[in-house]
Amino acid sequence: MSNASFIVVANRLPVDSVVDDEGNRTWRRSPGGLVTALEPVLRANQGTWIGWAGQTGAAPEPFEADGITLLPIELSADEIARYYEGFSNASIWPLYHDAVQPRVFRRSWWKSYYEVNTRFAEVCAAEAAPGAVVWIQDYQLQLVPAMLRERRPDLRIGFFLHIPFPPVELFMQLPHRMEILKGLLGADLVGFQRPLAAQNFLALTRHLLGYRPRGHYVTVDDRLVRADAFPISIDTAAYEEVANTERARHRAKEIRAELGEPDTVILGVDRLDYTKGIETRLKAFRELLEDGRFRVPKTVMVQVATPSRERVEQYRVLRDKVEREVGRINGEFGQVGLPAVHYLHQSFDRYELAALYQAADVMAVTPIRDGMNLVAKEYVASQIENHGALVLSEFAGAAGDLRQAFLVNPHDLTDLKDGFVTAAESSPDDKMKRMRAMRRYLRKHDVSRWARSFLTALGVPERSAAYNPGSPPAADAAEGT
């Protein structure tokens, strides 16, 4: 029975499965800004979130969590290997990131990608109420908009791509490129992180399909499709609140003490992914130590590399390279009890992350290519005393929002090194001026504003109950975010 007037479709549900010692399964909400932004809309419209529950085999029955209906999709182990690890992350991911890593194309992967997208579309078509709004998320589900349009032409369909969208010459390398492009054109609104990505998309409709886009719009089968930029953000108030806790503040002081009270702490926090530029960042730090521009123990680096896609060969190779470089740096420049690089291949809770952010004098966010990179925004929001410095890649989407950061070209090792030194040696007044400006921007442009702007463009009235989650964020009334 179709009954949901607002539906979010994503690869994963916004919950994690937890099994206790007696084998009982419960569900815990996953961290992340997307569910925070969309929760009021889902509740106000009796909405449903459709996605994979994170376990292979038969999907659980639909259930409620925090007042949101969750509708799990079944995925087999073979489908995870082919649809997710294969076509999504070994074909699309490297290609969309400007071919940072060689991409792999296999026909069996495409078949699985098509079948899984069809399953998502069928489940959504059955769940959606007449005239419902459906918001589809990210690169794993690029065929769903057209599949859903074919089954339910009455729906209002939006799609948002969280990663970069490549220029014409790169996209043209993709097998089944026509199917992908036509899949996205099934939406009424196709959202991207940056304006150039939307321009790339519209250029492809002209190049591959012979359409004539005008401004942000292209006409498809007598239907207007809008392509535009909607830069995603974070729950700024929540990050500031955590950073302001005594727990996080005290832990930040402990971290600096554990590091030996250095003059400068350089921090990197990334998924262990080849797009994040971790290897180049470490090499730049090593050369700065070789040049004598940085010295241990006065300057140390902390690199958090969160485990990611460890069954994929490219990621296993990357981990080996990163760990060898860390070992080389510490072997050459570390001292007894005082390593030059503190390498942490693990995940941390939000309090430990907030403490790390506050303990860092310089935050290094230097991806080779990134759709946005929310870590940069998390760091800025957590800098409640405005004393830190952000070194940010020009090729991260966040560079378009955080313009007061120390912007660097991660492909240019000399520029990267100079950026680290400039940030570390910047005056306290300069750092404070830059950080305050960035935090003011994030206070006004948080994840809720992102969701509002997209849904308003999709045709959801901004004054509806969906946009009345309660009192304004604490950060709106206080200096700093």
Image (cartoon, helix red, strand yellow):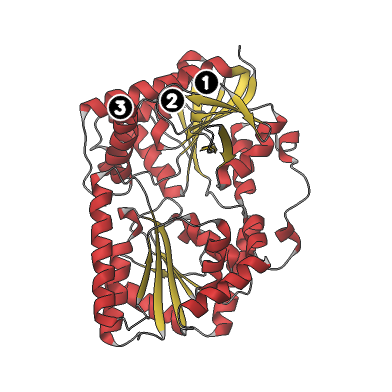
Q: Is residue 5 left or right of residue 79?
A: right
Kindly identify which numbered label has been placed on residue 124: 1
Q: Secondary structure at mark 2?
A: helix
The residue to which callout 2 is attached is 144
Relative depth, front residue between 383 and 163: 383
Rendering quarter of residue 43: top right
Q: Amino acid at mark 1?
A: Cys
Percent of width and height locating residue 473? 72, 54
Q: Residues within 10 Å of mark 3 (few under 14, many from 20)?
A: few
Rendering quarter of residue 199: top left
Percent of width and height locating residue 226? 50, 34
Relative depth, front residue between 270 and 393: 270
Kindly identify which numbered label has been placed on residue 38: none
Sequence-first disc among 1 and 2: 1
Answer yes or no: do the residues labelled 1 and 2 have beta carbons within 8 Å? yes
Image quadrant occupied by the C terminus: bottom right
Q: Amino acid at mark 2?
A: Val
Q: Amino acid at mark 3?
A: Asp
Sequence-first disc among 2 and 3: 3
- Residue sitting at x 33%, y 27%: 79
Relative depth, front residue between 80 and 280: 80
The residue to which callout 3 is attached is 78
Choose mark 2 or mark 3, whichever is in front: 3
Percent of width and height locating residue 30? 55, 43
Q: Is residue 240 left or right of residue 165?
A: right
Q: Is residue 481 above or below residue 63?
A: below
Rendering quarter of residue 1: top right
